[in-house]
Amino acid sequence: MEFGEIVRRCEEILRRVPPHVIVLAATKDRTPQEIRAALAAGIKHVGENYVQEAEKKKAEIPEAAIWHMIGHLQKNKVNRAAKLFDWVQTVDSLELAQKLSAAAVRAGKTIPVLIQVNIGREPQKAGVLPEEVFPLAQAVRDLPGLRLRGLMAIPPAPEKPEDSRPHFRAMRRLFDELKRDGFELDTLSMGMSADWEVAVEEGATLIRLGTALFGPRPTA
């Protein structure tokens, strides 16, 4: 898609999204030029799925942006991820959190993190089950170099936006329960191009948009 059309689409989405909700550009398989168009339109947050891909793109993008890891983080890539990303949204085990904590301390930074929840209980997807969120949150909260900011989920792909509502509602309940238990959380990352409006209605504070901003993902 051309630069100007991406700018137009991004500006339109930013007008529609409530001001308290962060719009993150999900940029897997997108070019640095496409990402720069989104940044030119006012998008400030960029999400990448792979460390190596993010390293290459970031080197070609001079504009300031807040970079999020939104894909599964392999434990052998943690040191590179800690240096590269401003946020990690996909903490899904204590072992990963501990490795990321140590890497953040070595890098001299504090990384905001989200716990990824497998809210649809899909065996092929990463994330902890809902009943495992509280003990992991307790452990992550005490790790140096990390700041637990909230929860993230990728519900089952919906046939229609309303299909996602029960999952978003369950995520909001988990989020609120943690806050009632004393966790200082401010970020609920849920909702993508197909269902972001429903996610916002159910309490999302951050939505991750790819095709809504850039059009269909290029085919190989």
Image (cartoon, rainbow, N blue to C red):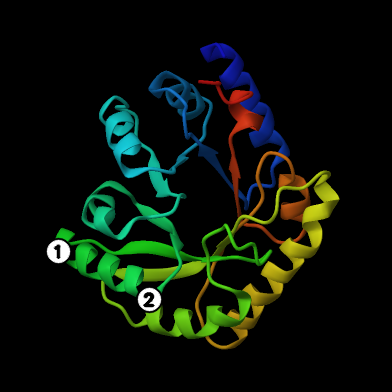
In the picture of the structure, the residue carrying the numbered disc 2 is: 94
Q: CA distance from mark 1 to mark 2?
A: 18 Å
Residue at image coords 68%, 39%: 193
| Percent position of residue 220, x then y | 50, 20
Count residues near mark 2 (Cα–Cα under 10 Å), then give few for <14, some for 14-19, many for 20+: some
Q: Is residue 72 above or below residue 5?
A: below
Q: Indicate the amino acid at tag 1.
A: Arg
Q: Indicate the amino acid at tag 2.
A: Leu
Count the marks. 2
Residue at image coords 65%, 67%: 121
| Percent position of residue 76, x then y | 25, 56
State the SS at label 1.
helix
Q: Is residue 149 above or below residue 211?
A: below
Badges 1 and 2: C-beta atoms under 8 Å apart?
no
Which residue sits furthest bottom?
A: 181
Residue at image coords 55%, 11%: 2
Q: Is residue 195 above or below residue 130?
A: above
Residue 83 in view of the camera:
yes
In the picture of the structure, the residue carrying the numbered disc 1 is: 106
State the SS at label 2.
helix
| Percent position of residue 23, x then y | 58, 43
Residue 188 in view of the camera:
no
Residue at image coords 78%, 51%: 198
| Percent position of residue 152, x then y | 56, 61
For the residue pair 170 and 6, the one nearer the viewer reads as: 170
